[in-house]
Amino acid sequence: MLFNSIEFIFFFLPITLFVFFAVAKYKGNEAAIFALVAASLFFYGWWNPSYLIILIGSMLLNYKLGGLLNKNRNKSLLIFGISLNLALIIYYKYAGFMANNWNFLTGSSLSFGEILLPLAISFFTFQQIAYLVDSYKGITSEYKFLHYALFVSFFPQLIAGPIVHHKQMLPQFSSNTRYQLNTNHLKIGLSIFAIGLFKKTVLADGVAVYATPVFTMVDSGQDVDMLSAWGGALAYTLQLYFDFSGYSDMAIGLARIFGIVLPLNFYSPYKATSISEFWRRWHITLSTFLRDYIYIALGGNRNGKIKRYTNLFITMLLGGLWHGAGWNFIIWGALHGSYLIVNHGWRSLLERVPFLGFTRIKTLSWLITFLAVVVGWVFFRATTLDGALSMLASMVGANGIELPNAIMSRLGGAAELLQGFGIQAGNTGGSAFILTWIWIICLMFIAICMPNVQDIFAKAKPSLSQQHFVTSDTFWPLLSLARKVSWADTTRWALFIGIILALGLLTLNQVSEFLYFQF
């Protein structure tokens, strides 16, 4: 069941909301938690009921292991528990990939048959690995299984995060006020949900039609010209941005309706002026998990620069592999690992060579960071390595530069001048070309210059994080609205939210999955 579907918005959500608060009022808090867990399991099983066996089995196993670790700090038991969780992911997510590569290297015919990837297995497994580690460290409390099941399966964050720690959510359900409908929470939650729905269904899905054809062409072995390649790459860059940003907002909004505040998971990453800042803004809870449970576990920055850089690279390589079983994801992770090494190395160099300070110009720093991210997204989106390499080759002009013939024919003498610079007339559609770049320009303005939900709802504390990247948000001093737009319980805001909600609902007849659901 998708957040952007008729059955979720008009049936599942209102029924679950009504049942939760009604049961809490007449049967008590524990019964309400049971109802919410049952609804969350129904939500998860909507795609495939057989997935529930894996989810429930995983919860039972990790709950038992967590209890044992909380009483007995047994490192061998912790390693055993983590290994079981990783084995589950490796089998379902990577067995086929490993078999294919083994067969390629050895000429054998190893096969695990058709393995259906359980929905959200990476998210709920990582969340439970964090629980085991926290249990081993003695920072968890004894919870009833029902409470633990809610922590893992709470439907707003179950499918694509944020990755939540037990200490962030379970204590919130211990408050009696969470079991009484709060109209303020309802207004804030629905407003944030409406903005997220608009981002996904109108913006992300709207620009997707200009990204998909280009990547389909390069993956099938066809060449594209430079402008088409950049149009496709930037369209996907913005599609992924608004798709994940929209999902993150919808998750935060849905949880807030129930009075629950989730951690921040997305904070205008395309405003970043360094790659390290980008990762403090993009998929924040995953970045935190990778830092706390992989980078620091490997030694972090405690053993010199070479070891630190090695740890950074390994962490990002595993982060790339987490996103999918494919060489393109591994290359994407390796790219970002390399970016971070260069970033930290350059910062160290600046401390020793003051005259290089001119490179701190924010516009230049932003441009380099953004272009590096776009190059990475090409590998992330292309389904073949050849397709990704062909796309990058086209982006640097290897296949020429073309303007649609319909546009060139209207340029008069300017067309001859352009041809003198090597720009030729092409067979691509003129309207599609123009619309591609209109979408890109408009969405770039929104992503870079407009405030995000964290800023707009700052007074309402939309997430557990209250951090703000003031220096980068003032990067565009003439255009940034981050400090000027603030949600309030007013008729004007209600009208605005109502309009964007209506626009989002009008697109429900063309439902599409969130891109991060495949991870």
Image (tube, helix red, strand yellow):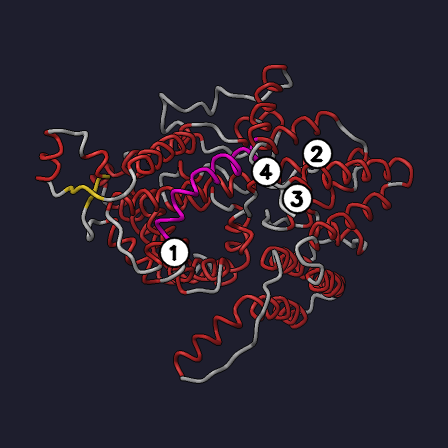
Q: Which residue lies under the disc numbered 4? A: 508
CB within 8 Å, label 2 to label 1: no
Residue depicted at 50% across the width and 42% down the height: 243
Instruction: Residue 382: give its label.
Output: 1
User: Is 206 part of what is drawn in magenta?
Assistant: yes
Q: Going from the N terminus, do you reach mark 3 or mark 2 first?
A: 3
Residue 62 as seen in the image, left or right of residue 217: right
Please provide percent x and percent y for residue 480: 41, 24
Please provide percent x and percent y for residue 108: 44, 85
Q: Residues within 10 Å of mark 4 (few under 14, many from 20)?
A: some
CB within 8 Å, label 3 to label 2: no
* Callout 4 amino acid: Leu
CB within 8 Å, label 4 to label 3: no
Instruction: Residue 332: give its label.
Output: none
- Numbered range of the magenta stretch: 195-215
* Most common secondary structure along the magenta stretch: helix
Q: Going from the N terminus, do you reach mark 2 or mark 1 first?
A: 2
Gap in angstroms between the C-alphas marked 4 and 3: 19 Å
Q: Going from the N terminus, do you reach mark 1 or mark 3 first?
A: 3
Residue depicted at 49% across the width and 57% down the height: 323
Q: Which residue lies under the disc numbered 2? A: 257
In the image, which is nearer the foreground, mark 2 or mark 4?
A: 4
Q: Which residue lies under the disc numbered 3? A: 156
Query: Is 406 situated above or below 350?
Result: above
In the image, which is nearer the foreground, mark 1 or mark 3?
A: 1
